[in-house]
Image (tube, helix red, strand yellow):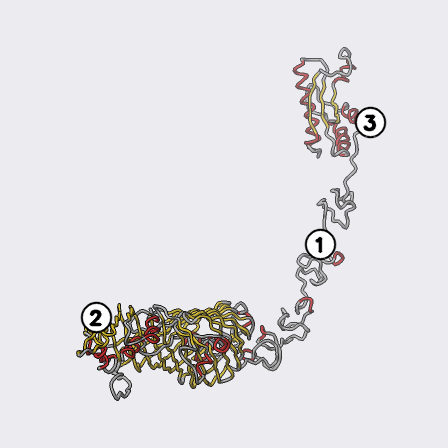
Amino acid sequence: MIKKVILTGLFLTGSLYVKAQSHIGYLTDNYSGVNSVISNPSNIVDSYFRTDINLAGFSTFFGNDYYETKTTDVFKNNFDFDSDGTKSPTEENNMALNVDILGPSFMFNLNKESSIAVFTRARAFTNINSINGETFDKVEDDFNENTDYKITEGDFYASANSWAEIGVSYARVLLDKEQHFLKGGISLKYLKGIGNIYVTGKNVTVDYDADGTDLGGGVTTGEINSSGRITYATADNYEAKNYKYELPKKSVGFGTDLGFTYEWRPDYAGDKTANTDSDVYSDKDKNKYKLKLGLSLTDLGAITYKNAKGNGYDITKSVSDQDIENQDGLLNVLNNLYTKISTVNNIRTSLPTALHLNADWSFNKCFYLNLNTDFSVTSKKKENTNSIANVVSLTPRYESKWFGFYLPISMVQYNGFQVGAGLRAGPLYIGSGSLITAITGKKSKGGDVYAGIKIPLYKSKTKDRDGDGVLDKVDDCPKIAGPIENNGCPWKDTDGDTVLDNEDLCIEVAGPLENKGCPWKDTDGDTLLDNVDNCPEVAGPTENNGCPFKDTDNDGVLDQDDLCIDVVGTVANKGCPEIEAKVTEAIQKTLNQYAKTILFNPGKSSIKAESTAVLVDIMEILKEYPNANFVIEGHTDSIGSAVTNQRLSETRAKSVEQFLIERGINSARLTSKGYGEKKPIATNMYKAGRAQNRRVEINLVK
């Protein structure tokens, strides 16, 4: 009896370890539909489904870090727990069981950007954490009521919880901008507790003395000296005789799941079709992402059993083996033999809250590689709390509308390396995260399996009957091929000039192709149409192809008349420069001969009228040499004062200069200067000589 009580106390509800995630491999499939709401509620929006109905499905996982054996041996008739398996006892072994049943559930789309799901689910968790496996091993294998032994258990935690839930999920698109796509979702769950039981121990030790109690008459029995505290609580009195289960009346709770999914869509332009009316349609029948990242937090919440019963006990006491034999069950042992130190009126059990990270890489439209991690948020060393194990899974998969295959490779906390397989075929899905390991491995610490049946109603494949790349949803001419910029219709030729309207700049007026369907203009009005006018914006003669003639050297003579196009010339010389005449000595002599005949009034600078003809002749000679400059020099004889003679020579030279300027000779070409009596050309002693010295000279400036 003592062995039975100890084993029952240490392993109240089983020997299996909980799995972190159900439906390994299947939930990563883009065609998992309403089932995917389990791991991330945002999955249901922008999916491949019009509606998805799950009829029934289940998933169960078992495992532990204490005992392992070959899976196929378990089903043998002669299987022996001790000889056919291997035990790995430690001071903190972990064991539990998880069962997840997905009942009738469905999802549907509210519109293009939001979806809703309703699901029913029944779940059962059994967690046993931090049990001293060495103690279990000793009690199981070596116990002898005639042998003394001591057990140091320390702290342990055991709980079993089962509940049903009805949930509603809502998800919508949060961002759809070019290559970036983000969606989010939330699930609100009503929870109905089905049953709960938990046991926790603090600093528990048991010291067994085989003959420590004297029953009299030389008869002894074993004595148990224990210490520490134990809390034992149940939602109902499961140990009562003739116990009949009834659904607890006051056992409700609420839960929440939150999730977000980001998709990187580098080919976003090719995933959407839009017409000129800004109607946008994307093909829902194919994958649009290259990389998908998911983040979710599941099972936030708790269930409260208001009619539950539980107590805390101080087990620091010595009792005999006979005392324990007289009790029926662990609860009676605690109530009748140990000291009650606290009472539990309501039991609150926390859900196995978990954080899920998911990355999905698309190689092409059918082959994917998924990396999934599940992390427990709740502590496994918390009273009456279920928790998951940390798991990392790498799953290559093939998926299409009616078939999918998965090969999950996982590393599970406590359980180690696992390889499984699963498939989806139409309405059926089945698989295991540990199938290959269970079949091929020498030893296994656990296993899992899932299966289900559903009614998937996929979105219809978008049609493009005319094959013009414009989907029928936004094609104004679905049976006749045409470009997307004309809403899938062929372009017209309204004016019948063979230039289609999309390229015709003058849709209603015929024109040649080379002028983009418009008739040629005469922009500059020179009678030549622009297509043959080399200068369409500047008027010009026909003989010069509509361009004005140039005057390259800007000499006023147009190039067609200019015999020297690149050299400045004169109009008179047909655009060529005049040949400049040189002032020869003969011309110079002639000028001075004319100049010497200029007569002045005696003692004055005024020119006599009879000298006008001479000055005109001089002027004509100067005009023949337009580029030559001349100096007009005045001279006198020596009669009179030198000062008077100097002034008179200057004024007479100035009078001649002024006469020539007034009659058209450029003033810049002429200067005047008087020398008085300084430069005689004959003797002033005689009258004839003095007459020669009274003169005006016009000399070339060299």
Residue 424 in the image, given as x and y percentages of width and height: 50, 81
Q: Is residue 147 left or right of residue 108?
A: left
Q: Residue at x 34, y 70 (%)?
A: 134
Q: Marks 1 and 3: which is nearer the front?
A: 1
Q: Is residue 294 visible?
A: no
Residue farthest along the front direction in this orientation: 218
Label at residue 586: 3
Name which residue type carries label 3: Ala
Q: Residue 568: give x, y in percent of width and height.
A: 74, 42
Q: Which of the two residues, 264 or 531, is positioned nearer the viewer here?
A: 264
| Gap in angstroms between the C-alphas marked 2 and 1 | 122 Å
Of callouts 2 and 1, which one flags the residue occurring earlier in the amino acid sequence?
2
Between 645 and 214, which is closer to the camera in this rendering?
214
Residue 548, numbered label: 1
Question: Are the residues at dot 1 and dot 3 in contact (C-beta closer than 8 Å)?
Answer: no
| Residue 445 shown left or right of residue 2 in the figure | right
Q: Quadrant of residue 609?
A: top right
Report, in whole angstroms, how far the alpha carbon at label 2 lies from the one at label 3: 156 Å
Q: Is residue 453 left or right of residue 664?
A: left
Tell me which label, 2 or 3, sits earlier in the chain: 2
- Three-letter code, disc 1: Pro
The image quadrant where one finds the N terminus is bottom left
Percent coordinates x, y for residue 595 in the rendering = 76, 25
The secondary structure type at the circle numbered 3 is: helix
Q: Amino acid at mark 2?
A: Thr
Q: How many marks?
A: 3
Q: Which residue is mark 2?
A: 316
Q: Are marks 2 and 3 in contact (CB under 8 Å)?
A: no
The vertical placement of 533 against 384, above or below, is: above
248 sits to left or right of 42: left
Work out whether residue 684 can be spotted.
Answer: yes
